[in-house]
Amino acid sequence: MTSHQTTQTMKPATAAKKLGVYLEATPAEFQEGVVSRTELNALQADPPQWLQDLRRTGPHPRPVVAAKLGISIAGLARGGVTEALTTEQIDALKQDNPEWLQKERATQAEVRKESVRIKEKHEKDRAKSAQQADEPRGPRS
């Protein structure tokens, strides 16, 4: 009995997401085909010029835009940014530093600070529980 391994493929939208690029800006042959896991790995390991250019200048998908601005995707929406942006547009937004962007960055900083606080609290609680588990218990009656 021989086992045949089927090639794992994904839709172009999934591959674009994994590559961190805006699907509509990719070449037509990428958008119209399917991408195998092997092809995706090859694109990640040795990106062709079109992929290098997209990563450098955009347009970038919303998760990348949000990361470059230091805010959440929801913060982008609250700021009225619903489309993909180029690196040049992102840099212009950073330069202009509108009030909504300042507010969203402050919100994101608070979220990160709170996440760190919660993580440290959980670690402290785990350490305390582990210490209590290691302590010898008195004789049972």
Image (cartoon, rainbow, N blue to C red):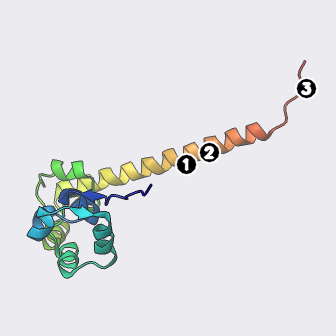
Residues at circles 1 and 3 in contact by the CB criterion of under 8 Å: no
Q: How many marks?
A: 3
Element at label 2: helix
Name the residue located 21 percent from the left edge and 75 percent from the top edge: 51
Q: Of residues 87 and 101, which is closer to you in this image?
A: 87
Q: In this view, does 129 lie to the left or right of 58?
A: right
Name the residue located 15 percent from the left edge and 52 percent from the top edge: 79
- Residue 97 pos. (x, y %): 19, 64
In which quadrant will I find the N terminus? bottom left
Q: Distance between the residues labelled 1 and 3?
A: 34 Å
Q: In this view, does 118 lie to the left or right of 23?
A: right
Q: Which amino acid does label 1 sit on?
A: Glu
In which quadrant will I find the C terminus? top right
- Residue 120 pos. (x, y %): 55, 48
Question: Residue 90, labelled with which disc?
Answer: none
Q: If you read the primary sequence from the N terminus, does the residue marked by circle 1 or circle 3 appear first?
A: 1
Residues at circles 1 and 2 in contact by the CB criterion of under 8 Å: yes
- Residue 81 pos. (x, y %): 13, 55
Name the residue located 27 percent from the left edge and 66 percent from the top edge: 19
Q: How far apart are marks 1 and 2 (CA)?
A: 6 Å
Q: Residue furthest front?
A: 1
Q: Distance between the residues labelled 3 and 2?
A: 28 Å
Q: Which amino acid does label 3 sit on?
A: Pro
Question: Residue 124, labelled with which disc?
Answer: 2
Q: Of residues 32 and 122, which is closer to you in this image?
A: 32
Q: Which residue lies furthest to the bottom in this view?
A: 49
Give the labeled residue for mark 3. Answer: 139
Give the labeled residue for mark 1. Answer: 120
- Residue 33 pos. (x, y %): 15, 63
